[in-house]
């Protein structure tokens, strides 16, 4: 009974509804059009929408993006760090409230960074990110970290950097000692590009992924093949990261 409910709930997802309407439109065009080129374009749109909206495709792409951090060797228990750096993942303003809030990705990163700070007994937490809100992403993350129990004197802010490359550059300016042990916190999908940039300036970088797009298959099997908005969103993030890696490799 629960499986029937899960499938029914998935069927009201806007992407699934659009997918069904596209199939209906394809059948109508195929029957009525003298030239079939319009039907072929519509069929291509259906195939792409379906492929990028189902779990197996999302998981395949995210595995290829994150596999180095899924299969990574465990960090030795006695490892200690000097600095934990957490990279901003977005924030937003609600002007009526006069507040700036972290988005879900940023929240996950800060919570994980605070845990890693305590686990590896790091001396400082660096919050990095400028953003375009009324206060910076770094300040938003610092406020969260304080609320989670990190003393204010242990928190440093990088409020200038706007992208992955600049995060590494600003940290390089912040610390003269290039041998410090850095714990790098960001999403697993974003970690490879970040790690490459930070290793240009620092010798000891430990990757500490805050979350993964990949997930082991679970739950109702039928749901994996029903188009879902969340999978389309995940694949959008994945494709953006692939483009980011390509761009960074071109610019060096």
Image (tube, rainbow, N blue to C red):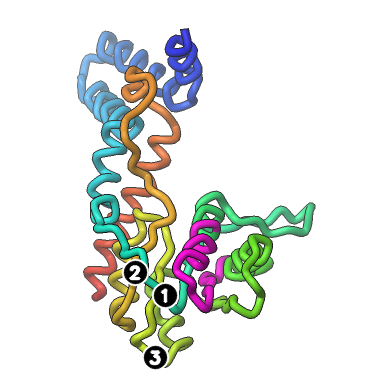
Question: Which residue is drawn at the image coordinates 40% and 81% (left, top)?
Answer: 169
Q: Which residue is mark 3?
A: 177
Asked if labels 1 and 3 touch by Cβ distance under 8 angstroms, the answer is: no
Question: Which residue is at 24% across, 62% downward?
Answer: 246
- Residue 108 badge: none
Q: Which residues are magenta?
A: 111-132
Residue 94 in the figure: left or right of residue 130: right
Kindly tell me whether residue 49 is visible in this rendering: no
The residue lying toward the viewer, choosing from 32 and 183, is 183
Disc 2: which residue: 206
Q: Earlier in the sequence, mark 2 or mark 3?
A: 3
Secondary structure beneath dot 2 equals strand
Q: In the rendered view, does 155 fall on the left or right side of 207? A: right
Above or below: residue 168 compared with residue 227? below
Q: Position of residue 93 (x, y in %)?
A: 67, 57
Q: Nearer the viewer, mark 3 or mark 1?
A: 1
Name which of mark 1 and mark 2 comes first in the sequence. 1
| Residue 241 image point, x, y percent | 33, 55
User: Badge 3: how crowded within 10 Å, few (<14), some, or many (20+)?
Assistant: few
Dot 1 crowding, Cα within 10 Å, few <14, some 14–19, many 20+: many
Which residue is labeled 1 in the image?
81
């Amino acid at each position: 009974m629960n499986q029937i409910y899960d499938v029914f709930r998935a069927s009201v997802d806007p992407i699934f509804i659009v997918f069904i309407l596209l199939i209906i439109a394809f059948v109508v065009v195929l029957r009525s059009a003298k030239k079939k080129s319009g039907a072929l374009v519509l069929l291509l749109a259906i195939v792409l929408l379906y492929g990028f909206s189902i779990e197996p495709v999302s998981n395949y792409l995210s595995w290829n993006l994150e596999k180095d951090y899924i299969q990574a060797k465990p960090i030795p228990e006695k490892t200690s760090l000097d600095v934990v750096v957490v990279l901003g993942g977005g924030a937003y303003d609600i002007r009526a409230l006069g507040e700036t809030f972290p988005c879900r990705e940023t929240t996950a990163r800060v919570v994980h960074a605070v845990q890693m700070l305590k686990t590896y007994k790091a001396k400082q937490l660096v919050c990095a990110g400028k953003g375009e809100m009324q206060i910076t992403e770094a300040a938003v993350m610092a406020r969260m970290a304080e609320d989670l129990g990190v003393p204010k004197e242990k928190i440093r802010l990088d409020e200038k950097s706007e992208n992955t490359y600049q995060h590494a550059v600003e940290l390089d300016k912040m610390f003269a000692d290039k041998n410090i042990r850095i714990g790098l916190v960001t999403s697993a999908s974003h970690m490879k590009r970040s790690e490459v940039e930070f290793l240009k300036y620092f010798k000891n970088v430990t990757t500490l992924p805050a979350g993964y797009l990949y997930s082991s298959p679970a739950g109702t099997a039928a749901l994996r093949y029903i188009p879902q908005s969340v999978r389309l969103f995940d694949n959008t993030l994945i494709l953006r990261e692939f483009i980011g890696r390509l761009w960074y490799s071109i610019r060096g």
